[in-house]
Amino acid sequence: MSDFIFTSESVTEGHPDKICDQISDAVLDALLTEDPESRVACETVVNTGLCLLTGEITSKAKIDYIKLVRDVIKEIGYEDYKAGGFDSNSCAVLVALDEQSPDISQGVNDADDVNDDLEDNTGAGDQGIMFGYACDETPELMPLPISLAHRLAIQLAKVRHEKVLDYLLPDGKTQVSIDYEKGVPVSINTILISTQHNPEIDGITNEEEIRQRIKEDLWTNVVIPATEDLEIKPNIHNTRFLVNPTGKFVVGGPQGDAGLTGRKIIVDTYGGYARHGGGAFSGKDPTKVDRSAAYAARYVAKSIVKAKLAKKAEVQLSYAIGVAKPISILVETFDTGVVSQANLTELIKNNFDLRPAAIIKEFNLRNLPKKMGGKFFRKTASYGHFGRRDLELPWENVKEKAAQLEEASKIFL
């Protein structure tokens, strides 16, 4: 199928699930800042007036979890009940954290393939499959639908924080449908934005009048700024633009829906454009391959596309708990590669070290929270972990690796 419409969604930092992702990653950042060897699997639940921290943590760090949770909720914008129905000052915060299972710990500490190589001595923290993807649809080598959905969500949050549209509240979602012809994006079919708002806007109380006012404001202050540097731009006459289709969105955030860590894994990755192994990222320290190996898979895929060895690349990695080396490596280029997939797999094996300890070392994952002032992983917890133009993410910096790959590939060309 070469002609189709593809749709991806994003959510703002005030979405209940994203509140949880940010809290879980704020906990991870705080622990790694004090103790880079911390083992963390932190899950968060939010509901009306409630936040629960649970999971397994082994660390020398001493953290005021309750203050940390309240600070994150406040920074998102839920400072009092009127600011979205969730109050950082008065919500109940429950902490139910245990230590990491010794059975898991020994698998990470003492890998099955132990030898004198330090990277061989650190096993994967769990079994699993991870996918990485890249394509040439955008400068950041991401699929256009998810890239644009994130742009809109970021801009929506920006005009709220800066009070350009002071009636907006923290919860919000975006969705973008792109027209493809012969497999190439050609136009923006539909933009959907659902945003929480005050029940009254400048004296307007009529539901339809409020919706129309928000729609006009979002086109001018969100859609146009978010797309101004794109080759493919929305057209007010041809692009379908939907805003709060139910009519109003006053009750939102944890008051409207319960939130959980790890429920927005497609938003976090490629918007459904590529396959997903099922593992979430937030709240997990770098020994968890759900996170670190997914970053590595993106690094490999992006390097392949950057080196012009393919227009599209999807990389699958698989691991066994307690084993350092990947069980399998698979690459798919969707008939866009300039070398065979067998040769490309050989290039990956010869040019990328995909053992967990090597990935952690390559990206400096244990030390980045402290280096970035205690806030690194939390910044990835909203608006995607890949293709970020606003963050310096080590797995996105592929210039040198792509050049290395391009040079190494010459024997196959």
Image: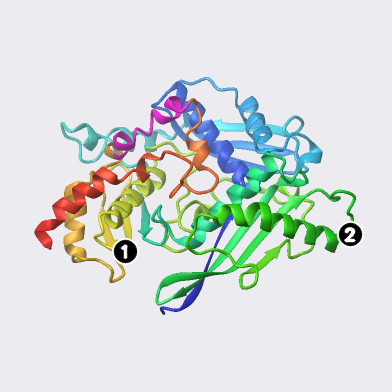
Which dot marks residue 373? none
Q: Position of residue 365 (x, y in %)?
A: 38, 34
**Which corner quadrant holds the N terminus?**
bottom left
> Measuring 16% from the left and 49% from the top, which residue is drawn there?
350
In the image, residue 180 above or below residue 16: below
Mark 1 burial class by Cα count in 10 Å: few <14, some 14-19, many 20+: many
- Tell me, yes or no, if residue 13 can be seen here: yes
Q: How is the image coloured?
A: rainbow
Q: Residue 68 or 173: which is nearer the viewer?
A: 173
Callout 2 touching callout 1 (CB < 8 Å): no
Q: Position of residue 310 (x, y in %)?
A: 27, 63
Q: Which amino acid does label 2 sit on?
A: Asn
Please state if 201 lies on the left or on the right of 59 as rendered: right
Ranked by sequence position, the earlier of labels 2 and 1 is 2
Mark 2 burial class by Cα count in 10 Å: few <14, some 14-19, many 20+: few
**Range of the magenta residues?**
359-372
Which dot marks residue 206? 2
> Measuring 65% from the left and 67% from the top, which residue is drawn there?
236
